[in-house]
Image (tube, coloured by chain):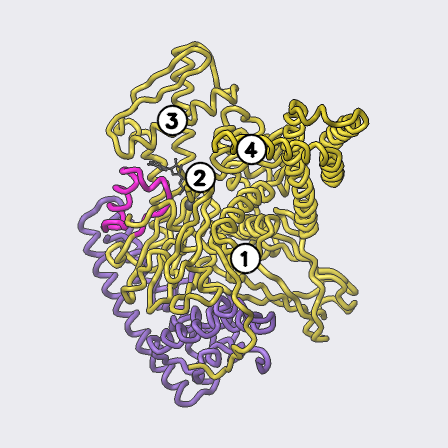
Chain colours: A yellow, B purple
């Protein structure tokens, strides 16, 4: 074994760490229950929280199924599939803008600003709402506070998309212990490590993203050999295709183009999705759509659906082949294939997978739940509850720096096991130069313009020396989350060199901090609101009781002055009731209580007398 | 506590001596063992210092495993450590002694692409020849590896760089020929 000793002494007491699948369509939270992962149900008993957020005119954002029904009633205040916008700039999402009802505000070059009901939100801010809901569900279910999480991301997510996911976690008040790739998580959940030295392919087709990963299993080690995918391919694409067909159909039948009508579009969208789901088990179904007194019905067969979606399904095959090539395996060498994601329920998808890998895919675990369950296993590894498993994942995209003429010099190649490092020495071109700017990109192409800009790193306050004399070693480290960290050292002085990071996409640290603070302020506001609400409920109860008591004979036994005090107290309580200060409401309730003390006593006596009388009669 | 930074040397991180002729299976076992010991996931609850050590050690281990498991990248690592200049290898220039053979193969590939059935046999013949050359090169490479391991001095490696370039070039030809026959 190793020559080096590691001290395992000072480990903290384990906290509860949950695993979260933050999906494009659906999100779930799971935890390690003794030895097995378990998904956590929400208040409605269903573990699936649709990744939909609605911003009502007053009060808290609405998340999940409740928000989903508002897609139709309040399409301009409700947002879905926001994961497609994570870590992106407005130029990246022109395609989605045509198909999704996102309202994007000006100034969205590096972080998208969404407009919902007159307010602005960022994609991490919206995702944080979904995470908050999951956190709350977990806390209610587990009966303890939950502050640590493992969150899954598509394996093919780039640095900015991963960072955005981490930001969402922080905004939601979660310490993100780790980002795990979704297909890898699925492999963990399947526990395929029971077999030794097998090769496993995980095919994950969800709502918005497609991933393929090939892993090698070895005594509990899950070593990812290669991964590939498309962060813009999934069930949404089937839906948009069907939607377009149906809209055209309706246009020719009714003579009206409904594509600009959000309510109609969302209603029809729901109808085609229902039809799509049915065709996974039935050979034929009907798309039924009622709108403003008119009805549209169209028979849709599985055959026709398959013809329509074949080109999209086939788009998953290229990445699968590249992935096998990168992993250095042939279909025959793959022992197991695992299907993940709701869209793998489509028979055509299964057939394509079966044909490509020449194997019968695993479908035992619920494809909706398996990723969250895997995240919980990873949470168990991190919290020290799971000892026999270890994940060795890879970075999906090559990392490089811009050199002369806009050419990329690759430093870390795709499919390198992470953490991974590379070092590069930089110097100055001019006498006394104080700064060196390094442009880091991700992607496989030769030219910078064909890759994705990740960040610019500014090496600052370099000692002024003649040109070419400075020697700054820059270290690039891709951590286990797949996120880049950069540090630099002046080799002449041995001193740490200041590096200023300017991410090309995403929120700055200050912005995230501000959002966290805002959510704390919000939490306080929420807390106050809740206290006022509760005080009003109490006040209602008392006011009702007093109202009723005024009809009692006992009320007439009070003096005029006493009755006036009661009326005064009622008026004051009502005044406080309509304010926002719960202390005042409580004070006025207290006062009314005092003012009605005598009345209560009198009524009690009457009641006792009545009861005694009753006893006599009975006797 | 940790004593100093983890080793940055690729052989040292595996706890083995610098050797060109390696038992890759043994290396893989060490890779898994050390991963179990050092992967940051195993130190998630530890202090910042321990976690940083784990990350650093794991990163070096991963880089080392990638480099050492393959004889070519392993040789490149040692060449670099011995001060040889190993620039970007394009593998484009035809080694002069192969000119004739390469020309014949390219002709045959061209004809095969145009659907000439006879040409496939020519490709197969060429392929066999180049595969034979690859085996020779590998044998030569292993001789150099062993010589270096027995007596690790710079001079032993003098011919290795050119040999690896030749190998890369032929490997590409073999790949193309196999693709044409598949
Ligand atoms: N029975 C089904 N047939 C076809 N598609 C389905 C079925 N059930 C779910 N889906 C699709 O699966 C996608 C959601 O899958 P999921 O794995 O939850 O996605 P994500 O990971 O993107 O949140 C949606 O596009 C949904 O329409
Ligand atoms: Mg998913």
| Residue A419: numbered disc | none
A542 sits left or right of A289 in the view? right
Crowding near the residue tagged with mark 1, few <14, some 14–19, many ≥20 C-alpha atoms within 10 Å: many
* Residue where numbered disc 4 is placed: A611
Q: Disc 2, ligand 1: is the CB inside 8 Å?
A: no
The residues colored magenta run A338-362
Magenta region, main secondary structure: helix
Which chain does the residue under circle 1 lie in? A
Q: Position of residue A251 (x, y in %)?
A: 42, 14
* Residue where numbered disc 3 is placed: A272
The mark nearer the N terminus, 1 or 4, is 1
Q: Is label 2 in contact with label 4 (beta carbons under 8 Å)?
A: no
| Residue A148: numbered disc | 1
Q: Mark 3, mark 4: which one is toward the viewer?
A: 4
Q: Nearer the viewer, residue A22 or A498?
A: A22
Compute the Cα span from label 3 to label 2.
Answer: 25 Å
Q: Mark 3, mark 2: which one is toward the viewer?
A: 2
As helix, strand or loop, the secondary structure at mark 1 comes to strand
* Residue where numbered disc 2 is placed: A44
């Amino acid at each position: 074994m190793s020559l080096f000793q590691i001290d395992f002494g000072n480990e903290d007491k384990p906290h509860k760490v949950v695993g979260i699948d933050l999906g494009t369509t659906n999100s779930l939270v799971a935890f390690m229950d003794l030895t097995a992962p378990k998904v956590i149900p929400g208040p409605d008993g269903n573990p699936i929280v649709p990744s939909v957020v609605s911003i009502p005119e007053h009060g808290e954002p609405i998340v999940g199924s409740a928000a989903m029904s508002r897609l139709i009633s309040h399409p301009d205040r409700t947002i879905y599939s926001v994961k497609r916008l994570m870590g992106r700039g407005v130029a990246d999402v022109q395609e989605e803008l045509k198909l999704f009802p996102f309202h994007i505000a000006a100034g969205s070059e590096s972080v998208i600003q969404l407009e919902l009901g007159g307010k602005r939100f960022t994609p991490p801010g919206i995702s944080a709402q979904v995470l908050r809901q999951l956190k709350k569900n977990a806390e209610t279910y587990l009966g303890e506070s939950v502050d640590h999480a493992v969150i899954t991301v598509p394996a093919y997510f780039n640095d900015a998309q991963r960072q955005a996911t981490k930001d969402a976690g922080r905004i939601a008040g979660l310490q993100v212990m780790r980002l795990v790739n979704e297909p890898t998580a699925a492999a963990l959940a399947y526990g395929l490590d029971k077999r030794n030295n097998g090769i496993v392919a995980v095919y994950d087709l969800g709502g918005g993203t497609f991933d393929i990963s090939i892993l090698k299993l070895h005594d509990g080690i899950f070593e990812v050999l290669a991964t590939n995918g498309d962060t813009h391919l999934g069930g949404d694409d089937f839906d948009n295709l069907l939607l377009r067909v149906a809209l055209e159909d309706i246009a020719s039948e009714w003579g009206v183009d409904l594509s600009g009508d959000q309510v109609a579009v969302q209603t029809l969208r729901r109808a085609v999705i229902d039809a799509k789901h049915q065709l996974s088990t039935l050979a034929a179904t009907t798309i039924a759509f009622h709108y403003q007194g008119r009805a549209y019905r169209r028979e849709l067969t599985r055959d026709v659906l398959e013809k329509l979606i074949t080109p999209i399904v086939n788009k998953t095959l290229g990445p699968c082949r590249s992935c096998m090539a990168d992993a250095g395996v042939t279909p025959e060498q793959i022992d197991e294939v695992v299907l993940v994601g709701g869209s793998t329920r489509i028979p055509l998808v299964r057939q394509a997978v079966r044909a490509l890998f020449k194997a019968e895919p695993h479908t035992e675990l619920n494809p909706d739940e398996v990723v969250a369950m895997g995240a919980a296993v990873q949470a168990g590894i991190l919290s020290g509850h799971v000892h026999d498993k270890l994940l060795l994942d890879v970075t999906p995209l090559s990392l490089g720096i811009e050199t002369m003429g806009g050419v990329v010099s690759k430093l870390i190649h795709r499919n390198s096991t992470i953490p991974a490092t590379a070092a590069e020495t930089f110097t100055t071109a001019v006498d006394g130069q104080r700064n060196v700017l390094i442009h880091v990109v991700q992607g496989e192409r030769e030219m910078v313009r064909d890759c994705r800009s990740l960040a610019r790193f500014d090496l600052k306050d370099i000692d002024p020396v003649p040109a070419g004399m400075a020697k700054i070693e820059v270290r690039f480290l891709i951590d286990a989350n797949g996120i880049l960290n950069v540090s630099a050292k002046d080799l002449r002085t041995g001193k740490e060199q200041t590096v200023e990071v300017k991410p090309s996409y995403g929120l700055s640290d200050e912005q995230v901090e501000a959002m966290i603070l805002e959510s704390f302020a919000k939490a306080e506001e929420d807390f106050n609101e809740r206290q006022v609400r509760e005080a009003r409920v109490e006040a209602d109860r008392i006011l009702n009781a007093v109202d009723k008591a005024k009809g009692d004979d006992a009320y007439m036994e009070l003096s005029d002055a006493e009755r006036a005090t009661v009326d005064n107290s009622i008026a004051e309580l009502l005044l406080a009731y309509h304010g926002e200060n719960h202390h005042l409401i409580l004070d006025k309730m207290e006062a009314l209580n005092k003012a009605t003390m005598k009345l209560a006593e009198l009524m009690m006596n009457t009641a006792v007398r009545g009861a005694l009388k009753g006893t006599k009669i009975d006797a | 506590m940790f004593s100093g930074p983890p080793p940055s040397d690729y052989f040292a991180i595996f706890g083995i001596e610098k050797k060109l002729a390696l038992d890759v299976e043994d290396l893989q076992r060490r890779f898994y063992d050390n991963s179990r010991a050092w992967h940051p996931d195993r130190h998630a609850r530890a202090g910042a210092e321990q976690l940083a050590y784990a990350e650093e050690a794991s990163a070096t281990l991963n880089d080392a495993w990638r480099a050492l498991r393959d004889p070519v990248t392993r040789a490149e690592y040692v060449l670099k450590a011995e001060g040889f200049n190993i620039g970007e290898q394009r593998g484009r220039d035809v080694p002069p002694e192969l000119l004739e053979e390469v020309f014949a193969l390219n002709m045959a590939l061209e004809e095969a692409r145009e659907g000439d059935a006879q040409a496939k046999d020519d490709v197969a013949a060429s392929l066999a020849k180049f595969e034979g050359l690859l085996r020779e090169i590998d044998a030569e490479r292993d001789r150099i590896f062993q010589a270096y391991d027995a007596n690790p001095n710079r001079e032993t490696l003098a011919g290795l760089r050119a040999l690896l370039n030749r190998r890369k070039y032929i490997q590409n030809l073999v790949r193309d020929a196999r693709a044409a026959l598949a």
